Amino acid sequence: MIMNYDVVIIGAGLAGLSSALAVIKKRLKAIIISKGLGNLYSSSGYVGLLGYYPLNYTCPVLSPKAALKKLITEKPEHPYAMVGQDFIEEALSVFLQTTRDMGLPYSGTLDENILLPTTVGGLLPTTLFPDTSAKEIGKAEEIIVLGIEELIDFCPQYAADNLKKRINVKIFALWESLRINYYREINSYDLALLMEREEIRECFIKRLKPRIRKGSLILIPAVLGITNWCKIISHFENTLGCSVLEIPTLPPSVMGYRLAEALKGYLKQNGVEFLIGSPVTDYTCKKGSISEIFINSINNRQMKIKGKSYVLATGGILGGGLRVYPKEIKESIFGLPVFKNLPVSHKNFFNLNGQPFAYSGIAVNNSLQPINLGKGEVVFNNLYIAGALLSGYDPFVEKNGNGVALVSGYKAGLQAAAGGGAQ
């Protein structure tokens, strides 16, 4: 059985989904193939373009646009330099418009990062965020960090104590229970489903009301619904007379889940097909181009998928796109050459410049095509690389994993749709 497409995208994380957004703009036929659901389900749902730069600075980037301009000049091997300023701005614009079209509106601008709280009370420099997160915590008169007793992965006192070190605002920690009979440990997704039930939500709010002063900003783990989150957040705010800001939780992340499901639904409505749970097992190539790939379907039958162009967005070391061996790192599907810094690690684990292994990945040209490390020749003419597979940056220190995924995925999708060669 042979399935034919204009663009075949391998990987269902933000980079792969962003590639598909670019492809459907050109009204081409695309499929997303992935061995798993993708990394968005465990992510914060925020998109940070650039949190810290230069890397040894401890102050967060206030203007991503200004910092990006400096980074692109100083680091020509960085993925942002390969993508280019114009494509970065276009990718952000398309993403913001798409989120409004799909009913999960995001806000933000390349001109400014805002600081949003993390589950441990840190402040994360963020460029794009859900509209419900558009609240500046530094300007609040009083902050209440609300913990839910059934959710054992979030400690409000710990988060509140850390926030006190970062912002000069009155901050209090508060515990409350849903008072439900549950016979196993529950996570944030379970709680979000429970919050969809009006009777549980009403009782919870009723117990909270006498304990919270009107006008406060409530920081609560992101458990306020899976599909009816907008209605539920408004219900909390209107009944309590307070603003509510959800904090991303440990996986499974409800905020990441909302974004992943909304994007997938939007892409399906626009004709993109999905094959989840079907890893790529082999491929053939002809005259410097990939001819077809082979996958094992869920019933363990081998299928052949043929595309005019391919986007590879399988993730880095954590995502399984790169495999680490005692003396080398390998790309897991096409055997692409992997650029890596030596030595593999720095003796100081918390070195401000990051660990060398984090820079490992596939070297590409300005069209995001994979190249040989020595001669700079394109490996496959119709293959484009996106996301954490790219070499030359450290997402853990720069706080830009979703940012790189979004913009490189978008450009890789456009290049694949055009079938263009090296620039």
Image (cartoon, grey):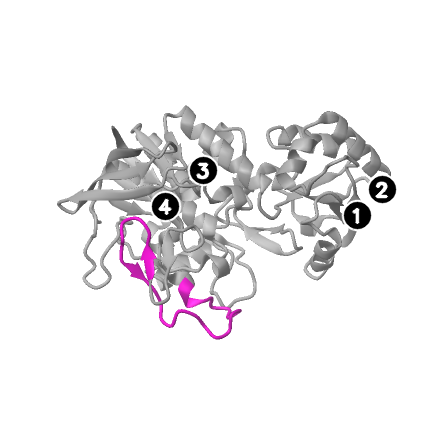
The answer to whether residue 283 shows anywhere in this view is: yes
Residue under pointer 1: 174
The three-letter amino acid code for the residue at tag 4 is Ala
Q: Does the magenta stretch include residue 47?
A: no
Amino acid type for the residue under numbered disc 2: Arg
State yes or no: discs 2 and 4 in contact (Cβ < 8 Å). no
Whether residue 415 is visible: no
Q: Name the residue under label 4.
A: 313
Mark 4 Cα shell of 10 Å, populated few (<14), some (14-19), many (≥20) = many
Q: Nearer the viewer, mark 3 or mark 4?
A: 4
Does 340 appear above or below 39? below
The verdict on residue 343 being magenta is: yes
Residue denoted by label 2: 211
Which is more toward the observer, 65 or 309?
Answer: 309
- Kindly indicate whether the residue at mark 2 contacts the one at mark 1 (C-beta within 8 angstroms): yes
Task: Give the distance between the C-alpha atoms of the residues marked 3 and 2, in whole angstroms.
Answer: 39 Å
Residue 51 vs residue 181: left or right?
A: left
Q: Which of marks 2 and 4 is in front?
A: 4
Compared with 337, 20 (above or below) is above
Residue projecting furthest to the right:
210
* Range of magenta residues: 329-357
Marks 1/4: CA–CA distance = 42 Å
**Mark 3, residue position:** 95
The mark that comes first in sequence, 3 or 4, is: 3
Q: Position of residue 204 (x, y in %)?
A: 78, 34
Of discs 3 and 2, which sits in the foreground?
A: 2
Label whose residue precedes the other's in the sequence (2 or 4): 2
Q: Is mark 4 on a helix, strand or loop?
A: loop
Q: How crowded is mark 1: few (under 14 residues within 10 Å), some or many (20 or more)?
A: some
Q: Residue 228, image x and y in percent? A: 63, 28
State the CA–CA distance, disc 3 to disc 4: 18 Å
